[in-house]
Each structure stands twice: as C-alpha cells, then as structure tokens.
Image: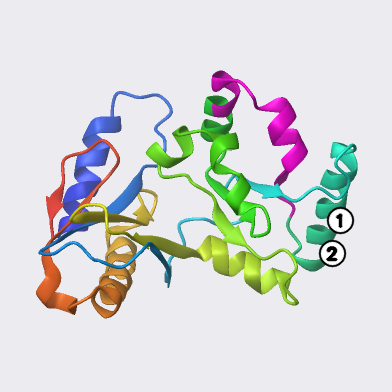
C-alpha cells in the first residue's frame, strides 16, 4: 500500500514535466538508539536491481600510467570488454586531478551518471577530489575490486545490491531500495529484502526500529511501520 501511494505521489509531481525522470525510492529507518559502532557498509541483494547495464555507470580507477590518461582508460575498457561484457565510463585518478578541479566540473560530473564505482585501491584518495556533491546527493562511489578473479561477478554484485551505511551520526539512516520505474509489487519486494537486512544487522534488531518510511528525494514520506 505504501509503494502504491508513493507511486501516485510521483505521478502527481511529474505530470507537468515533458521528460519525467525516474525517481529513486528510499527506505528511511528511524532508530530508538544511535549505533555506537564505527561506519559499516552493508550490501543487500535486491530481487529487482535498481541499477543495470542500461544505467549510466562511471568507474574511478587507479592509473596504469600517470602520464597517459588514454592508456589507462583503454586498459580498463579492454579488461571489462573481455571479462565483464559491458564497458562503463572510466576516469583514471590523474584525470580526476587534472580535468575536474573546478566546482562546476565536479557538480556536472555528479549529475552525469546514475552510479559511481571506485577502484578499491584508490577509494581513500577520492573524497577531496570529487567534492561534497557526491555525498549530499548520496552518490558517493561504491568500492569495487578490479583485481578480482571473477570480475564479472564482482561488478554485477556491486551494481545489483543496495548499499546501507550504518554510522554513529544520528538516529535516522536511509537505503536507496528501489526506483519509480518499478511496479508497486517489485518495490515492495525490494523493501522487504532491505527491511530483513536492517533487522538482522541493526544492533538490538527490531527493538531498535522506531519507524520505517519510504520517500523519493523530494517527496513526502509514506509511513510503512
């Protein structure tokens, strides 16, 4: 019922737009107590993935040769073409330092792709290079092991799972669980999987869950629990 109600809200908000964009649907978890643990990333498999190979995906990578950006890009394009069967956009670390220095460039980059991945070897170097937009818009890159033996499995696990960040900063947390191009039934399926993961991973389980709601980035919140 909550999924159906939220889809009606989205339809009302978008009815006057010529090109209505797909909205992200977030599960908002309000807790009774703030977790005391340090940040933990939980990846939740979704029955109906939010991101697929039809999504615009960008990968930040380690340099193959710091003085040759094109060679680095070609290296990873060949790697993905041969091992994954899909070639996203690649931006080597040197390119980030050279081509995306300005506020405007960082902001434009953030809005150009649906999902960002980061070579696990350089993730710690990215925050000052990508800027705050990626974090305020919840588009901070997901780690990917580009040296994985089964790179195809590693890649599709990263794009097909929802990511939940458990932190000690506040009593409310959020998971990008679905999108408005899914049916209400598909959205409900995804939400059930996310809620199960929340209960199993949250300190004190259900007793620490005060409320569950769903919303888009700019809609009202629909209560679920």
Name above or below for residue 12 compared with residue 89: above
Q: Indicate the position of residue 171 as horizontal and vertical percent values.
A: 17, 56
Q: Quadrant of residue 155?
A: bottom right
Q: Who is closer to the viewer here, 105 or 84? A: 105
Name above or below for residue 138 compared with residue 96: below
Q: Visible in this render: residue 43?
A: yes
Q: Indicate the position of residue 9 as horizontal and vertical percent values.
A: 20, 40
Q: Quadrant of residue 108?
A: top right
- The image's mark for residue 82 is 2
Q: Who is closer to the viewer here, 186 or 153? A: 153
Question: Is the N terminus in the top left, top right, bottom left or bottom right quadrant?
Answer: bottom left
Q: Indicate the position of residue 175 as horizontal and vertical percent values.
A: 33, 57
Q: Who is closer to the viewer here, 101 or 71? A: 101
Label 2 to label 1: alpha-carbon separation:
6 Å
Q: Is residue 100 part of the magenta span, yes or no? A: yes
Relative to residue 189, is residue 213 drawn left or right? left
Q: Is residue 44 part of the magenta span, yes or no? A: no
The kind of secondary structure element at disc 2 is helix
Q: Quadrant of residue 113?
A: top right
Question: Is the C terminus in the top left, top right, bottom left or bottom right quadrant?
Answer: bottom left
Q: Visible in this render: residue 54?
A: no
Q: Disc 1 marks which residue? A: 78
């Amino acid at each position: 019922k909550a999924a159906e109600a939220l889809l009606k809200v989205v339809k009302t908000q978008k009815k006057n737009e010529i090109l209505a964009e797909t909205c992200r649907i977030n599960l908002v978890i309000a807790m009774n107590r703030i977790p005391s643990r340090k940040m933990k990333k939980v990846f939740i498999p979704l029955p109906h993935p939010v991101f697929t190979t039809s999504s615009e995906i960008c990968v930040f990578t380690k340099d193959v040769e710091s003085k040759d950006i094109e060679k680095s890009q070609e290296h990873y394009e060949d790697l993905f073409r041969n091992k994954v069967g899909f070639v996203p956009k690649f931006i080597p670390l040197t390119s980030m330092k050279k081509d995306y220095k300005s506020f405007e460039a960082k902001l434009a980059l953030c809005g150009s792709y649906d999902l960002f991945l980061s070579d696990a070897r350089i993730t710690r170097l990215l925050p000052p290079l990508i800027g705050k937009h990626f974090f305020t818009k919840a588009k901070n890159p997901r780690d990917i092991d580009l040296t994985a033996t089964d790179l195809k499995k590693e890649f599709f696990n990263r794009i097909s799972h929802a990511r939940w960040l458990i932190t000690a900063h506040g009593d409310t947390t959020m998971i990008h669980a679905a999108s408005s191009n899914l049916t209400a039934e598909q959205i409900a399926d995804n939400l059930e999987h996310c809620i199960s993961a929340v209960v199993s991973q949250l300190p004190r389980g259900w007793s620490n869950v005060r409320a569950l709601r769903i919303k888009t980035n700019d809609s009202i919140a629909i209560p679920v629990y």
